[in-house]
Image (cartoon, grey):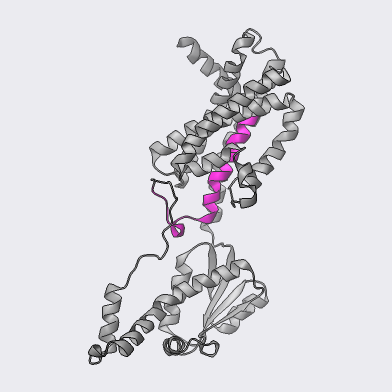
Amino acid sequence: MKKTFKWFLLLNKRLYKKLTFVLILMLIPLLVFGYGVVAREESGMLTIALASEEESTLAAQVMQELKDSTNLIRYIICETPEDAEKMVSDSKADAAWVFGKDLENSIYRFVQKPAKKNAFIRVVERENSVLLKLAREKLSGAMFKHCSRVFYLSYIRENVPQLDTVADEDLLRHYDEYAMDAELFDFAFLDSDTETPEPEDANYLLIAVRGLLAIVVVLGGLAAALYYIRDEQAGTFSLVSQKNKPAVEFGCQIIAVLNIALVTLVAMFLAGLTGPVGREVVIHILYTVSVAAFAMTVRRLCGKLSAIGTALPLLVVLMLVICPVFFDLGALRQLQYLFPPTYYINAAYSNRYLMLMIVYSAAMLAVYTLSGKVLKRK
């Protein structure tokens, strides 16, 4: 036990003498802090200018609801329709949504006869992109609850003559009391039994941080593989028998990656990106083993310092593109399983990926062992 602890201290001391490793550790809190600062700024995938043709309580209410609803779209409330449209023409906004005059009566006319001539919102766009089409769904959702009150009132007046003596205000008051406040869609994962944040509560910029940190951990593991080759060349482990070399390499990798994973966990906790603490600890332990096995396999397949140095930036780019860090590309989904970040990102929401991480680690260690025999590399 004393010998193991001594090895642990020596290997840790060895790591902190290397400037590259210290810089990787410093990169993690800087990454989280930097993204946190950006996430608190007003930003979005789209910028929509909002305006009304006349002062309207309902229009002001809808515009404020849109502005407060999500950080995926940045909404700017303008004083006049001309200001909103000028923002589009000056490329300061992707679209302008202008609410028409006499909005409440316009909604009523539209509900009675849904025709283009009765439309009550003018949409001005620079281009007809997919994102703007999706944004218009957000606008439709914001207006639905106001239109639904008119639908309800019209239905009652046309189909329930028993309530003819009841005033419109009383019917609408009854509707508002019993109207459903729940969302039409519930955000969840198929095999998850963990609590997941609602999309409105999670900044889309910070969501990507988890994936980026996963890649930084892999970067640290590959750096540890480089250190191991240098130490081997310097004769650091010359007294270790060839039979025990894989165990020593695995120990070097585990200690290096564990240091990085610990800093990652603390940084994520401070940024509010973690789920239940117990689950996160399990995820990071399993991910440490996965990254260690992956880095050992890459080290053995490449063999030389120059080969790993060449492969390292290529692997980082591949993980950024293929793994679901920013987007989940369906066409490349099968390739995701070659890289450990995929399991780490999904394990936060899916129990299945916890088990897959164990399988992945075993598979990587098997490839490591087999490649040693086939390529005759130590």
In x, y percent, where is residue 30?
Answer: 57, 43
Given the current orientation, which residue lies at the most extreme bottom position? 165
Say if residue 226 shows up in the picture.
no
Apparent side of residue 130 relative to residue 174 in the rendered image (left or right)? right
Q: Is residue 205 magenta?
A: yes
Expressed as whole percent of the image width and height from the top left, the position of residue 268 reads: 48, 42
Q: Is residue 62 depicted above or below 343 in this figure?
A: below
Can residue 191 be seen in the rendering of this structure? yes
Q: Which residues are magenta?
A: 195-222
Can you say which quadrant of the picture contains the C terminus? top right
> Does the magenta run of residues contain 350?
no
Majority SS type along the magenta span: helix
Residue at 65%, 13% (x, y): give it.
236
Q: Quadrant for the N terminus, please.
A: top left
Task: Give the camera-side residue of 366 and 85.
Answer: 366
**Residue at 55% across / 29% down in the picture?**
361
Q: Quadrant of residue 112?
A: bottom left
Residue 183 against residue 293 in the figure, above or below: below
Q: Nearer the viewer, residue 144 or 313?
A: 144
The residue at the far front in this view is: 159
- Residue 32 in which image quadrant: top right
Taking 230 as reference, is 209 above or below it? below
Q: Where in the figure is residue 122, as x and y percent of width and height? A: 56, 83
In the image, residue 60 lies at what x, y percent?
44, 79
What is the quadrant of residue 249 in the picture? Answer: top right
